[in-house]
Image (cartoon, rainbow, N blue to C red):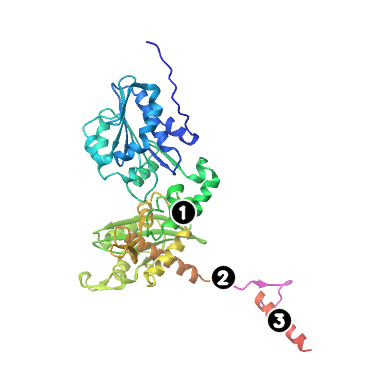
Amino acid sequence: MGEVEIEIPYAPRAPFRPFHERTQRWSCLVAHRRAGKTVAAVNELIKGAMTCTQPRPQVAYIAPFRDQAKRVAWDYLKHYSRPLWDGGPNESDLSVRLLGERKASLFGADNADAIRGIYLDGVLLDEFGDFKPGVWGNVIRPALADRKGWAAFGGTPKGRNEFWQVREQARRNPAEWFLLELRASESGILDPNEIEEARRQLTPDQFAQEFECDFSAALAGAYFGREMVEAEREHRICSVEHDPALPVFTAWDIGYRDDTAIWWFQVARDEIHVIDFHASNGQTLAFYAEEIAKRPYRYARHWLPHDARAKTLASGGKSIIEQLLVLLAEPKEKDTKVAIVPNLDVQDGIQAGRRAIKAAWFDEVKCYDGLEALRQYQREYDEEKKAFRERPRHDWTSHPADAWRMLAVAWERQVIEAPKDTRHRVVTVGDPGPDFARASLDDLWREHDSRVRRGARI
């Protein structure tokens, strides 16, 4: 039997063509509302089913809930697959039989047992951020294993959830993952007037989340969310190399059972170049001193929090700063360059942290964990009052964020206290003789003012 050409009623929108033409097994689609993601996904499933070389291929569209899958994608699947039907749709189990013993089905992640035990050659997980935790790892991924099926994760941001983690994995592994991010301001899909009307009618966070694919916007109560989004959009989270011509500073928040966090940074004019980050717990001060020493940096100052002055019995009556004065001492230096950051109120420190982020350039690779902490650092939520408290929530983000506050306050102190250039600029006229007297511009202006005042009295 010869080849038969069958045309389906689908013309992909230009922004989705790279998705249909990708070569990677895994893909992530982050798209604004009404971009056409579901239509593209359904047609990619049909394409995947028809081009699969395995016997009796099976593909699936999975939504957080079965009713949602039916409501959102069932009509699309029937419409676009109609020319390929071989038996037609089954309304009870939401599946369509296609030519060549191929099958496309719809499922809900709320009933993962319905998926368990079957094989899949391709799957689209829509609004993946709303899935039950564990469905992907425990049920869907094993279903792809023996036939090496592909998977595409789709959705609109709803905070730093599992979908965000998938997006980060795709962003950091372009050889294995295809990533498509469509923002309304850039995709060209929606009418610009409609976008502006939506901007006026929604809150800034709602618009940023639903139309600009902003994962930070949905994280209510984030202290540095806006500033980190600006840093990303201004491409200040990138590759930041260490400049050997500039000294290096560190800023610490110190714990033992909790994390100790350290930022490494340089100051270039009015910019902060953040070149490294480390956080770990349960380690001794000697361990962190080794972390400092093993980096090939020329240190100017190590900034510690104010409580580093406290003396403890466990350390033989010595404070942290006293211990670090010894551990961080450099053989050729008389000054071990350890200093205490002024003790500011937490809220004042947070404001300083925001200002510092606006001036900062971050190395995306070396500071990855620290950057995530800054994005997720947020206020504590009061379940009874249904409102955010003024104090920060204590979790894994606290110590990196506190160390950032130390950095910010230290940086502002350095800027404020930087000595001004007070050297006199000397002016000479003609060749200096034996009675030559040096005069600065300040001397000349004073003489000028004196002459003017004497002239006024005359």
Residue, far right: 458
Could you tell me residue 105's position as x and y percent? 30, 30
Assess disc 2: are there few (<14), some (14-19) or many (≥20) residues with their C-alpha within 10 Å of its C-alpha. Answer: few
The reply, left or right, for residue 255 in relation to residue 1 is left
The reply, left or right, for residue 17 in relation to residue 454 is left
Quarter of the image where the C terminus is located:
bottom right
Question: Mark 2 or 3, which is nearer the eye?
Answer: 3
Amino acid type of disc 1?
A: Leu
Helix, strand or loop at disc 1?
loop
Mark 1 to mark 3 CA distance (whole Å): 61 Å
Mark 2 to mark 1 CA distance (whole Å): 50 Å
Amino acid type of disc 2?
A: Asp
Helix, strand or loop at disc 3?
helix
Location of mark 2 (residue): 421
State yes or no: residue 425 in magenta: yes
Work out whether 243 lies above or below 179.
below
Do the numbered discs 2 and 1 sit on residues whose CB atoms are within 8 Å? no
Sequence order check, earlier mark of 1 and 3: 1
Location of mark 3 (residue): 449
Question: Mark 1 or 3, which is nearer the eye?
Answer: 1
Could you say which disc has been placed on residue 202 in the image? 1
Sequence order check, earlier mark of 2 and 3: 2
What span is colored magenta in the figure? 421-440
Q: Quadrant of residue 180?
A: top left
Could you tell me residue 196's position as x and y percent? 53, 50
Could you tell me residue 433's position as x and y percent? 71, 76
The residue under the point 46% across, 63% down is: 355
Query: Which of 26/429 is in front?
Result: 26
